[in-house]
Amino acid sequence: MHAHHYRTPDPLVGKRVLVLGIGNSACDIAVESSRVAERTGDITVRPNIDRFEGSKVIFTDGSSGEYDVVVYCTGYKVSFPFFTGEVIRAEDNHVDLCRRVVHPDHPGLYFVGRIQPLGAIMPLAEAQAEWLCDLVTGSGALPSEQEMRRQIATYDANLRKRFVSSKRHTIEVDFHSYRAEIHKERKRRSPSRRAALSSQAARFETGTAALNARLRSFRVGRWRPPQRKAPRRPTTSGQVEDEQRAGRGGDHRAGLVGHDSLGEPDPRARLDDGADGGQPSAARAD
């Protein structure tokens, strides 16, 4: 069976399993099958296969073994059946893509996840998607076509120096260096975006200068907070009856009527009749 058709290790339970390959898929399937196969937990590295004789596999070093299942983890054939050959061709799994995402001949056509990383693919695919969003929304910008083709040629040359020439090694990337490349591309801004950022920066500098000027005025004492005036309290008033009307002589306090803080008569107030020590009497307010 091929790794393309592998879903769960259930078909390998109790079987003698040979996994052909040493890439991501091969290592994953080898580990999973080691938990359920006949030789549970044992993984032995073998040389290349020389030939098959029925269920017997002969290796290039002359050793052999009997196996029930051989899982081919030999990579994939890259194809785009939804495109005609005039649009995209993947000869020997190779497609000219800047940063493995952008085709220089087809603006607006992007590829996400078409990489074979030495590490996890998910964070790199996410970084590609973020760059793609920059390009689609107009905040990001692509390099010139000449620069893109130069980057593609450099990438291909590095692959030939590092890996064996094969269909498998056409989309290899190093995790950290490739993520740094995408991060660098995201710093490339479109002209309109650069103008908008420059305008925003200018407004920010103007506002900051005004704020600093006010802060300096605070420090040197040129600014004083406004003095709040105390609210005026309502005045109390009394009314003194005419001595003739009261029919009494004596202290002028005899006719003083108490008021509360709002200027209303205070029913609790009591007034002396004067210095004669007589009974208190309430004064009348006219």
Image (cartoon, rainbow, N blue to C red):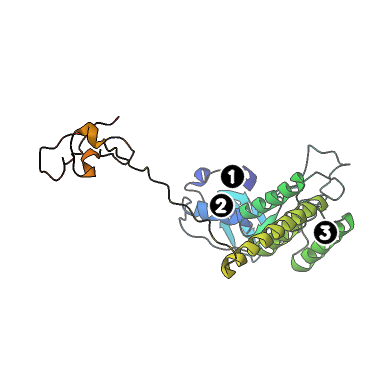
Which numbered disc, 2 or 1, marks the residue that appears first in the sequence?
Answer: 1
Q: Residue at x 79, y 65 (%)?
A: 160
Q: Residues within 10 Å of mark 1 (few under 14, many from 20)?
A: some
* Residue sitting nearer the eye, 59 or 185: 185
Quarter that holds the C terminus: top left
Mark 1 → mark 3, Cα distance in angstroms: 33 Å
- Amino acid type of the residue that numbered disc 1 sits on in the rendered structure: Tyr
Total marks drawn?
Answer: 3
Q: Dividing the picture into quarters, in which one does residue 206 lie?
A: bottom right
Q: Residue at x 24, y 43 (%)?
A: 252
- Amino acid type of the residue that numbered disc 3 sits on in the rendered structure: Ile
* Residue sitting nearer the eye, 4 or 152: 152
Q: For mark 2, give the secondary structure.
A: helix
Residue 40 on image: x %, y %: 45, 55
- Amino acid type of the residue that numbered disc 2 sits on in the rendered structure: Ile
Mark 3 lies on residue: 152
Question: Where is 44 relative to 36, above or below?
Answer: below
Question: Where is 267 relative to 10, above or below?
Answer: above
Q: Are marks 2 and 1 in contact (CB under 8 Å)?
A: yes
Q: Residues within 10 Å of mark 3 (few under 14, many from 20)?
A: some
* Residue sitting nearer the eye, 111 or 92: 111
Mark 2 lies on residue: 29
Which numbered disc, 2 or 3, marks the residue that appears first in the sequence?
Answer: 2
Q: In the picture provided, is 231 more to the left or to the right than 157?
A: left
Single out the mark in the foreground, 2 or 3: 3
Q: Is residue 280 visible?
A: yes
